[in-house]
Amino acid sequence: MARRVAWSSRLSHHQKEIGVRTYKIGYFIGSRSSASINRILSKALIRLAPHDLEFTEIPIGNLPLYSPDFDGDYPPEPRALKDAITASNAILFVTPEYNRSIPGPLKSAIDWASRPYGQNSFDHMPAAVIGASPGQIGTALAQQSLRAVLGYCNSRQMTAPEAYITFHPDVFTADGDVSDESTATFLTDYMRDFRVHIERVLTVIPRP
Ligand SMILES: Cc1cc2nc3c(=O)[nH]c(=O)nc-3n(C[C@H](O)[C@H](O)[C@H](O)COP(=O)(O)O)c2cc1C
């Protein structure tokens, strides 16, 4: 799932001279489906992203449901989740819409990451939200729900552009190749804007 890009081989001489850095992006897939169209979308986004973004999936499939009973001593899976977020410079959410809202497993993962009280992993974290569905509004309502949650978690969200993807199987191959030029351009621009957003946020609020 991860695309690792070596600093020295992919950055231009000019970029190295001015100190442009690589950003580590932790990404969530909001679906547990083995045939997830959002996983396909994530592959397309990784393919089309600027080369100085490194992607690592933050898996949610093995997480128990959140309970405050564990706030004093997190189980290994939620602990690993929080560590993975802390190791990231920014977070990308690629999610389906379930019943006009956030899929339950993703919401529970966010709840784990936001706790214990005072140890919210999303505090000041640059983030972006995107999602695909076969329907015409392309996860718009799930994304609005997710944005409200991330706002409460004090994440620094990219508010524009928004990206509501109506998934057409003839446009995306299973490994994330995008055959439609306008879709590819839109997704490329979205990821370029995300990189700009990350740099802006981290310039003002460097991560520890
Ligand atoms: C429980 C459930 C609820 C769904 N609710 C919505 C919905 O509110 N809006 C929508 O556009 N699609 C909805 N769908 C259809 C999903 O968009 C579709 O199954 C999609 O493939 C899910 O993304 P995934 O393939 O990445 O899992 C729902 C699907 C399920 C299983």
Image: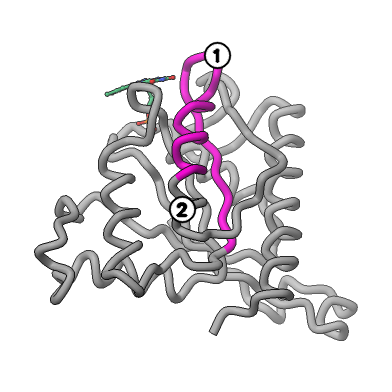
Name the quarter where the C terminus is drawn: bottom right
Residue 77 location (% of width, % of height): 20, 65
Which element carries disc 1, helix, strand or loop?
A: loop
Q: Tell me which segment is drawn in magenta.
A: 126-148
- The residue that mark 1 highlights is 136
Q: Are marks 1 and 2 in contact (CB under 8 Å)?
A: no
Residue type of the residue flagged with mark 2: Tyr
Estimate how packed mark 2 is, as few (under 14), some (14 to 19) or many (20 or more) residues with alpha carbons within 10 Å.
few
Residue 82 against residue 195 in the figure, above or below: below
Q: How is the image coloured?
A: one colour
Residue 183 location (% of width, % of height): 70, 29
Left/right of residue 114 with respect to residue 203 in the rendered view = left
Question: For the residue with label 1, is its CB less than 8 Å from the closest atom of ligand 1?
Answer: no
Residue 152 bears which disc, if any? 2
Res. 54 image quadrant: bottom right
Q: Which residue corresponds to the image point at 29% horizontal and 53% vertical from the top-left?
A: 109
